[in-house]
Image: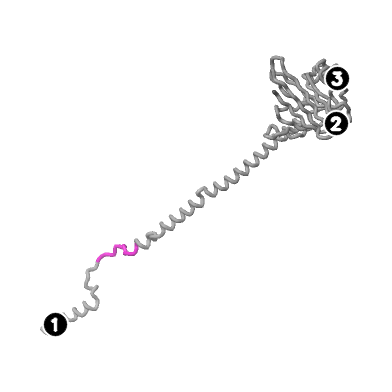
Amino acid sequence: MRRTLPFFAAALLVAACANPADLLPEYPDTGTASDTGADTSAPKDAGKDSSVIGKDAAVADSGSDATVSDAGVDAALDASVDASVDASVDASLDASDGGGVVDASDGGGVVDGGTGNDTCAVAVTLVDGVSASGSTNNATDDYHVETNISSVCDNNSSLGIYSYDGFDVAYTISVPNTKKLTVVVTPDNTWDPAVAIVTSCASVGPTCLGGADEGFDGDPETADYTNNTGSPQTVFIIVDSYDVGVHGPFTIKASLQ
C-alpha cells in the first residue's frame, strides 16, 4: 500500500500539468462572447463616414448653385421684361407720332415728328427749347392760312401775300400767360417752308396769332406770339408752303421766354 499511493499522486500531478484548465471549475455558458458586442456594433468610422456624406450633401444643396442659377434666370427674365416693356413703349410712342421716334420723352435731344402729325388731331407736342425733326414729304394739304386771315397775321407778316397750297403738318404747345413763344422752322435742304401759329385748326386763318413766310429756298422761318390773355393758352403750329410741289424735311424748335 505504501508504494501505491506515491505513484497515484505523481500521476495526478502529471495530468494537471498537461491541461491546467481541467483543474478549473465549470460555469454555465451565458452567450456573451467578448467579441459579440464588437461584431454587432457599427464600425467606429461609420459615423464619420455618414457625417462626411451629410456635409457633402449639404454643400451640394446648400443653395449656392440654386442661387447662381436663379440669379441667371432672374437676370434673363429682367432683361426680357425690360426689352418687352421698352419695345412696347417705343411702339406706342412711334404710333402716336406716325412712325417717328419721340426722343425727347426718353432723354434724347430731338423729337422725330414723322408724318403722322398731318392734322391737328394728331399734332406732336413740342417741348420748350427742344428741337424736333419732321417732314412734309408724305403729308397732305389740309390748311390754308390765307383764307379769311386775321389782321394780325395779314398786317404784321407776309402770310397774307401768299396762298398755302403745300403739304402741311401740325404741332402744339401750351403758352403760359405773359410768356413769349418763338418758333423757328429750318428746312434741311433747298425748299421754302412757311409757319403759322393758330388757336383753332378748324379756322386757321381767322385765329392766326403770328407766322412767317419771308425767306427763300433753304432759309429758316421765325414766328412769334406773346400770350397776354391772362391764362395759359394752347396753340397749334402749322408748317406749310406756298405750293404743292414745295415740301421736305425740317427741324422745328419752340422756345418760351
Majority SS type along the magenta span: loop
In the drawing, does residue 161 fall left or right of residue 177?
right
Residue at (13% x, 82% y) in the render: 6
- Assess whether mark 1 and mark 3 are in contact (beta carbons under 8 angstroms): no
Q: Which residue is mark 3?
A: 160
Q: Is residue 203 visible?
A: no
Q: CA distance from mark 3 to mark 1?
A: 168 Å
Q: Residues within 10 Å of mark 3 (few under 14, many from 20)?
A: many
Whether 208 is among the magenta residues is: no
In the drawing, does residue 91 fall left or right of residue 70?
right
Q: Which residue is mark 2?
A: 217
Magenta stretch in the rendered image: 27-36
Residue at (80% x, 19% y) in the render: 208
Disc 3 on helix, strand or loop? helix
In the drawing, does residue 75 fall left or right of residue 214?
left
Relative to 89, residue 32 above or below = below
Relative to 182, residue 45 above or below = below
Counting from the top left corner in percent of width and height, residue 85 is at 67, 36
Whether 35 is among the magenta residues is: yes
Q: Which residue is mark 1?
A: 6
How are the colours assigned in the image? Answer: one colour
Counting from the top left corner in percent of width and height, residue 141 is at 86, 26
Disc 2 on helix, strand or loop? loop
Q: Quadrant of the C terminus?
A: top right
Relative to 67, residue 222 above or below = above
Q: Is residue 30 visible?
A: yes
At label 1, which amino acid type do we have? Answer: Pro
Counting from the top left corner in percent of width and height, residue 230 is at 69, 14
Q: CA distance from mark 1 to mark 2?
A: 159 Å
